[in-house]
Amino acid sequence: MQKTGSLPLPSADALDASTALAARIGEAIDAAQGWLGFDRYMAMALYTPGLGYYSGGAAKFGRDVRDGSDFITAPELTPFFARTLARQLAQWLEQGLDEVMEFGAGTGRLAADLLLALETEGRLPSRYWIVELSGELRARQQATLAARAPHLAARVQWLDALPARFAGVAIGNEVLDAMPVRLYARVGGVWHERGVARSDGGEHGNDARFRFADRPLGAADVPAAVAAIPGDHDIVTETHAEAEGFVRSLGAMLSRGAALLIDYGFPASEYYHPQRTGGTLMCHYRHHAHPDPFLYPGLQDITAHVNFSGIAQAAVDAGLEVAGFASQARLLMNAGITELLMSLDPNDARSFLPAANAVQKLLSEAEMGELFKAIALTRGLGDSVPIGFAAGDRSHTL
Ligand SMILES: C[S@@+](CC[C@H](N)C(=O)[O-])C[C@H]1O[C@@H](n2cnc3c(N)ncnc32)[C@H](O)[C@@H]1O
């Protein structure tokens, strides 16, 4: 478990908010006879109104600890991410579609930069919907749009849940990884569901108020993908009912069009590989990645990698087609990130070098290029191959 001494301390106000959230989680644990599924803990830690990480006042997105942020995402790193994705969106919009919908829009950077790039491409949608759970983020998105793309801001409208029907192009960057997961642990050859109980704080050498607590499961209660992990060695893993449910709702909503979902993760064969013994649960606090979800509830991000086979299956169950699955590097290269970068003057080191470095981060196998994947889900768009998946499509691995 993470020792808090090595990390920057939160402000007194932030600590008070975390204490209030921990009290609520404690009450939920008591109400559930002392044991809460990890998915419920994660949902409360991230989304309790006013106190959860995404619904409270944490800075979250940014470049480094000095701005109080915890992590950086691709749209924050460089506008070349949005400019390149705009080409893929434009190809889909050309097929008689006129609206875009973004899930979980963070600071609003992707929305602003996509709208600006689609304007350049001559493919501006008449409406850009943002589905956002957090009122605090919605306000930030409005400020970003007013600052970066004021003449386009009127096209943006917010929703707090998926609508019943939508024809158009949907996009979500790092949204699936923020959805609550269940944890499963095989200990001594027996599968358990790993949940959360109250702690007296002693066992981790810090003041943690919660601890993991394992409940043994009967064979019928172990999800099939988990039960199928070979061996009897100890292993922890996750399942993603909420993300898969979200994709089924997306499938029910999308009457015609495409959805592009980008996130870190793998197909099931890699996700549930017997050597991945520690699972993929990861927390982000002030640009430190660490495995302790009980540190400062509400003040740090909690995520898990995405099982893209489960996402693809949920999409197919909902009547969508998987039109492509590729690494982020492949998607961006196919959609022309290199030509876009070359529109800058390479001799102008002050603008070219930072842009080239950021693009390199998006593409490098050692950084985001290979771990991040993109999946394209479509309905009613015929056989046309999406440009971002024209080479290097790995749908067969799902
Ligand atoms: C890691 S952030 C990514 C933000 C932004 N897309 C980016 O790339 O910078 C995850 C976002 O997903 C949002 N989110 C989680 N579940 C969601 C859901 N069911 N519908 C819409 N947004 C959701 C969170 O509120 C949060 O804004």
Image (cartoon, helix red, strand yellow):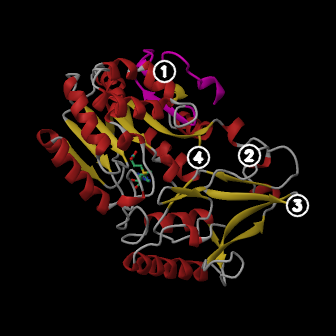
Q: Is residue 281 above or below residue 386?
A: below
Which residue in the structure is indicated by mark 1?
389
Residues 82 and 157: in front is 82
- Whether pointer 3 and pointer 4 mark residues with C-beta atoms closer than 8 Å, the reply is no
Residue drawn at x 46%, y 76% is 18
Q: Identify the residue at horizontal 69%, vertical 75% (top origin).
A: 204
* Magenta extent: 370-398
Residue annotated with mark 2: 276
User: Cβ(mark 3) to ligand 1 < 8 Å?
Assistant: no
Question: Is disc 2 surrounded by few (<14), some (14 to 19) or many (20+) residues within 10 Å?
Answer: few
- Picture quarter containing residue 211? bottom right
Q: Badge 4 is on which residue?
A: 305
Residue 386 on the magenta span: yes
State the separation of the CA atoms marked 4 and 1: 21 Å
Q: Is residue 187 magenta?
A: no
Q: Secondary structure at mark 3?
A: loop
Q: Position of residue 335 (x, y in %)?
A: 40, 21
Mark 3, residue position: 188
Residue type at mark 4: give it.
His
Q: Whole-percent x and y of residue 262?
A: 47, 37
Q: Residue furthest left?
A: 151
Q: Name the amino acid type tagged 3.
A: Gly
Bin the neighbour count of mark 3 within 10 Å (Cα to Cα): few under 14, some 14-19, many 20 and up. few
Q: CA distance from mark 4 to mark 2?
A: 12 Å
